[in-house]
Image (tube, rainbow, N blue to C red):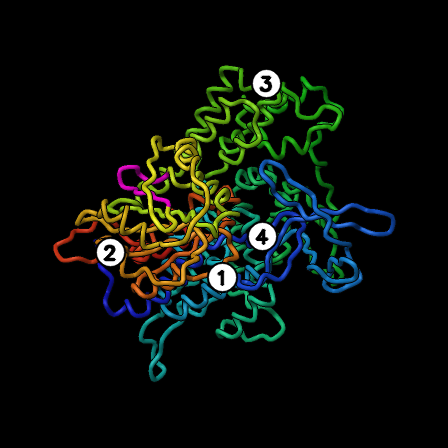
């Protein structure tokens, strides 16, 4: 295993802390529906986004917040839309309760994420480039967009380094990493799709991001946002697809037609032939200055439509053309809709991906299609390949107990696969606060435990509950049902002693000589006395704490203070993680991977920390065609 260069430890310490904060941050940078943004002191961005909808009532637009309560979404009226104000606000009895936001980038989150990347870059340019290269193969889409944008504009662009007018050598070209992130195509779907490429450009044009870039010296114009090689990279991307029409046709069939057009407009792309416009059905008009010269006034083929076709004809067309699910649904005539026969044709034509099949489980159940052996077999195989917790979220909306249990097992298996590698040579301890201060939160704590605890190897996990005393919790089956059963009889009450968990339970299960210890706390940190002495006496020697604050707005810092006293990191785990189908597996695996590897005499550590993994990642290069 490659060891960190001691000369880099001093700078990588702060970089690692920033990296850990980013990888465990769960607020989305992009929202595809309207929302309200309100102040939220204590959060990294200072604001919070919530989904909203509205309905017209006379001359007013009443705004409703969409709150998730169990399996239902509840509308809560919060005010009236004031479209005369800039920005547009939502008012209740004349008082502004928040800012109304249309679908799109969440600027505050985008600027915060970008600023954190900038801080890492200032500490270690090379580490930032390797981080971006590593991130391309991960599932965190927002971070990929932010890192690609940053690498496209940062100042290390391969410029010649001169002395007395003579070129001595050429600097590293880290902008090539950004280009590669935009241009590399992967069959596993981890590359940047056209919508994400658009998002890269939109992010660079945000005022907050442009300000950061100017402050770092990445651009000189006070009027125009620094874009670095964004236009160049997108032009190469478009040119490659124009020269390979099959790729362009594939994007159109996948529903990216208007997105490709938006990319072309953003960078002022000039195609080589009129065929580019023909494939996109993009009618060209002459510009006011007369500069355009290709396909001006040329007729374009009308968009494909299934209007007027019978159900049988639509099914035949689906089997012949194999459109993807979203495009097919968009072309279905309203009078026919998504019938059993149409869905069967889509599945036969493989227009429905494995991910779509899981998402559509409630629809398949309603249509009675999970009773068809061939479809049930494919659905089962798809459930065995899920990579996140979406299956668990879907399980809440199905009626069949058997289907629900299969989806829950699929989500559990995905979590176990995600953490299997990163928990190697790691022993996990979980301490759940059931003191009196948790009386209003113990139910939520149990719900969260059910979503992640079964992912850890049972033989390397010790769980306890504590108030003034601690009791070990035996989980008889590594499943959500097993976790729920194990915590069924516990009620909140009594005082708080985190140290009891170490003294009475954890000390009986010490890690082996080759294992590191990671301790998770679930609770409100509501203890003012230090329990560092109990931790030291237990012999556990944790390399890190993980803290899931329940409730999230607790002002106590007892666990964090003890972590600081022990000189170890304390990773925050946000409750928002459990509402995101992608976040549980991603955040937990990243958090565990971020746990430092303990350095002990005579130990041969097999586990590699996240920082070391990133340092061992080669920087990306452009594909050969670019």
Q: Residues within 10 Å of mark 3 (few under 14, many from 20)?
A: few
Closer to the chain start, of discs 4 and 1, is 4
Badge 1 element: loop
Tell whether label 2 touches label 3 (CB within 8 Å). Answer: no
Farthest residue, direction left: 602
- Is 155 situated left or right of 30 in this image? left
The region drawn magenta spans 455-465
Q: Between tags 3 and 2, which lies in front?
A: 2
Q: Is residue 207 visible?
A: yes
Q: Nearer the viewer, mark 3 or mark 1?
A: 1
The residue to which callout 2 is attached is 541
- Camera-near label (1 vs 2) is 1
Q: Earlier in the sequence, mark 4 or mark 2?
A: 4
Considering only vertical position in the picture, is 345 above or below 522?
above
Q: Is residue 594 above or below residue 46?
A: above
Q: Is residue 609 left or right of residue 286?
A: left
Q: Residue at x 52, y 49 (%)?
A: 576
Front residue of 520/435: it is 435
Is there CB contact under 8 Å for labels 3 and 4? no
Instruction: Answer whether labels 4 and 2 touch (C-beta < 8 Å).
Output: no
Q: Residue at x 41, y 34 (%)?
A: 412
Q: Going from the N terminus, do you reach mark 3 or mark 2 first?
A: 3
Q: Determine crowd level at label 4: few under 14, some 14-19, many 20+ residues with C-alpha closer than 10 A.
A: some
Label 4: state its secondary structure.
Answer: strand
In the rendering, at what x and y percent does residue 263 appear?
Answer: 60, 52
């Amino acid at each position: 295993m490659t060891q960190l260069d001691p000369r880099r430890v001093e700078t990588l310490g702060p970089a690692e802390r920033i990296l850990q904060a980013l990888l465990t941050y769960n607020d989305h940078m992009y929202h595809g529906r309207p929302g309200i943004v309100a102040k939220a002191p204590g959060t990294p961005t200072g604001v919070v986004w919530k989904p909203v909808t509205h309905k017209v009532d006379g001359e007013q637009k009443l705004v409703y917040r969409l709150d998730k309560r169990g399996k239902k979404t509840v509308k809560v009226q919060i005010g009236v839309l004031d479209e005369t104000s800039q920005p547009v606000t939502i008012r209740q009895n004349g008082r502004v309760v928040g800012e109304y936001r249309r679908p799109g980038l969440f600027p505050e989150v985008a600027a915060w994420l970008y600023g954190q990347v900038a801080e890492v870059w200032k500490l270690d340019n090379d580490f930032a480039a390797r981080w971006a290269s590593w991130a391309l193969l991960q599932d965190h889409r927002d971070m990929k967009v932010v890192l690609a944008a940053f690498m496209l504009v940062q100042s290390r662009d391969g410029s010649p380094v001169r002395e007395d007018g003579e070129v001595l050598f050429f600097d590293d070209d880290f902008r090539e990493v950004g280009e590669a992130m935009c241009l590399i195509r992967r069959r596993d779907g981890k590359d940047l799709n056209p919508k994400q490429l658009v998002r890269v450009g939109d992010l660079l044009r945000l005022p907050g991001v442009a300000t950061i870039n100017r402050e770092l010296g990445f651009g000189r114009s006070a009027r125009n946002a620094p874009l670095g090689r964004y236009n160049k990279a997108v032009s190469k991307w478009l040119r490659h697809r124009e020269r390979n029409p099959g790729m362009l046709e594939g994007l159109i069939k996948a529903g990216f037609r208007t997105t490709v057009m938006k990319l072309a407009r953003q960078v002022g792309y000039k195609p080589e032939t009129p065929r580019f416009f023909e494939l996109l059905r993009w009618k060209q008009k002459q510009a006011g200055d007369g500069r355009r010269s290709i396909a001006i006034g040329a007729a374009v083929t009308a968009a494909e439509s299934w209007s007027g076709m019978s159900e049988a004809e639509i099914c035949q067309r689906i089997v012949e053309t194999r459109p993807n699910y979203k495009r097919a649904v968009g072309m279905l005539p309203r009078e026919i809709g998504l019938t059993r026969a149409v869905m069967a044709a889509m599945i036969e034509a493989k227009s429905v991906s494995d991910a779509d099949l899981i998402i559509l489980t409630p629809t398949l159940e309603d249509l009675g299609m999970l009773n068809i052996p061939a479809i049930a077999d494919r659905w089962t195989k798809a459930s065995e390949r899920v990579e996140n917790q979406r299956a668990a979220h879907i399980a809440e909306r199905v009626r069949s107990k058997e289907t629900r249990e299969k989806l829950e097992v699929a989500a559990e298996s995905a979590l176990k696969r995600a953490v299997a590698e990163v928990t190697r040579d790691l022993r996990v301890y979980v301490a759940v606060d059931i003191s009196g201060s948790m009386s209003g939160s113990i139910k939520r704590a149990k719900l969260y435990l059910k979503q992640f605890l079964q992912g850890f190897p049972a033989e390397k996990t010790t769980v306890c509950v504590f108030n003034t005393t601690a009791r070990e919790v035996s989980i008889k089956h590594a499943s959500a049902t097993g976790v729920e059963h194990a915590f069924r009889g516990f009620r909140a009450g009594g005082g708080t002693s985190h140290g009891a968990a170490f003294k009475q339970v954890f000390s009986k299960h010490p890690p082996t000589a080759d294992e590191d210890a990671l301790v998770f706390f679930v609770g409100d940190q509501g203890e003012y006395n230090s329990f560092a002495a109990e931790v030291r006496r237990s012999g556990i020697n944790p390399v890190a704490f993980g803290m899931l604050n329940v409730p999230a707005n607790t002002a106590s810092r007892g666990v964090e203070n003890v972590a600081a006293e022990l000189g170890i990191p304390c990773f925050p785990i946000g409750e928002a993680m459990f509402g995101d189908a992608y976040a549980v597996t991603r955040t937990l695996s990243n958090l565990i991977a971020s746990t430092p590897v303990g350095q002990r005499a005579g130990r041969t550590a097999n586990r590699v920390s996240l920082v070391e993994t990133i340092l061992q990642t080669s920087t990306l290069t452009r594909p050969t065609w670019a």
